[in-house]
Amino acid sequence: MRQLFRNVFLLAACLLLMISSAIFVRRQLPPTPYALLFTLPNGTPCSRPCLFGARAGETSYQAALDLLTEHPLTRNLVRRDRVSTMAAMFEGIEMIVEVQGDAHGKLLQISLHIEPSYTQRLRSQTTQLPALPEALLKGGSMGETFAAIGAPDYVQLDGGRELRLYYQFDGLTFYFRRSNERLNPQDVLTSVFMYTVSAPETASMLRWIGFTSSERYYMHAYPR
């Protein structure tokens, strides 16, 4: 009997050591490119809500520009300042980040765009642009969003192949390209917006009920 207890104890100790080692190794791994969206330039997670370490309404406009100049996802992009307003654009071939300040010198909003046709419309045609420094960001997905910051408050299902997730109390809105009529963790990120105020609630913003079909969302919102 004593030998049995000893074996059980040794087995439990080995399992505990394996779990602790796995946690330690995971913590030592650098953040994924997508997770870097929500970190300071040195990789330290920033206080939510944030993008690239900046917080709309709190971070100064100049500090936001400094963060983007240093951040590993944006530091190699080409900066283009607007003359007439407190605004700037950081451009790459596959990615554009827009920044806007308010009259008090605070960050009003910041947005990231990966969707090709949209970035093509925004892009300067006269500047030679670098490629995206972190190519994996192009494959950012809804599942990675959940892993990074949790479930949203609302979802908006447009008639086409696009959907929006609203983190209403954080002022964050995510746009995704849909693969079919269901909401899937694999749906691909196209844009992220962070505002100083939450988006106005409308009838088209449906309460989040999980990864399921559009039909179930409408049935849940408008029961017969």
Image: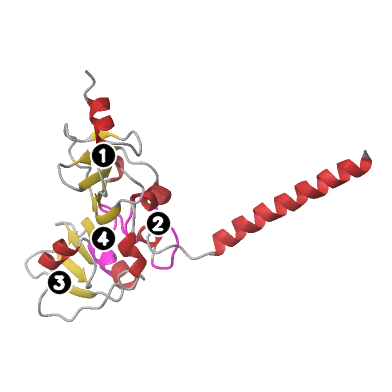
Q: Is residue 156 magenta?
A: no
- Answer few, some or many: residues within 10 Å of disc 4's Cα (few below 14, many 20 plus, some between 14 and 19): some
Can you identify the residue that label 1 sits on?
Answer: 155
In primary-sequence order, the first of circles 1 and 4 is: 4
What x and y, as percent, mark residue 211? 35, 39
The secondary structure making up most of the magenta span is loop
- Label 2 and label 4: CA atoms lie apart by 15 Å
**Precedes in sequence: disc 2 or disc 1:** 2
Q: Which amino acid does the dot numbered 4 rest on? A: Ser
Residue 171: x and y in percent read 26, 46
**Residue on which the image places disc 2:** 46
Q: Are marks 1 and 3 in contact (CB under 8 Å)?
A: no
First reached walking from the N terminus: tag 2 or tag 3: 2
Q: Secondary structure at mark 4?
A: loop
> Residue 216: x percent and y percent?
28, 30
Residue that mark 4 sits on:
60
Q: Earlier in the sequence, mark 2 or mark 4?
A: 2
Q: Nearer the viewer, mark 1 or mark 3?
A: 1
**Dots 4 and 3: beta carbons under 8 Å?**
no
**Picture disc at residue 81:** 3
- Residue drawn at the location 33% of the way across and 37% of the way down: 212
Crowd tier of the residue under label 2, counting other residues whose Cα lies within 10 Å: few below 14, some 14–19, many 20 or above: some
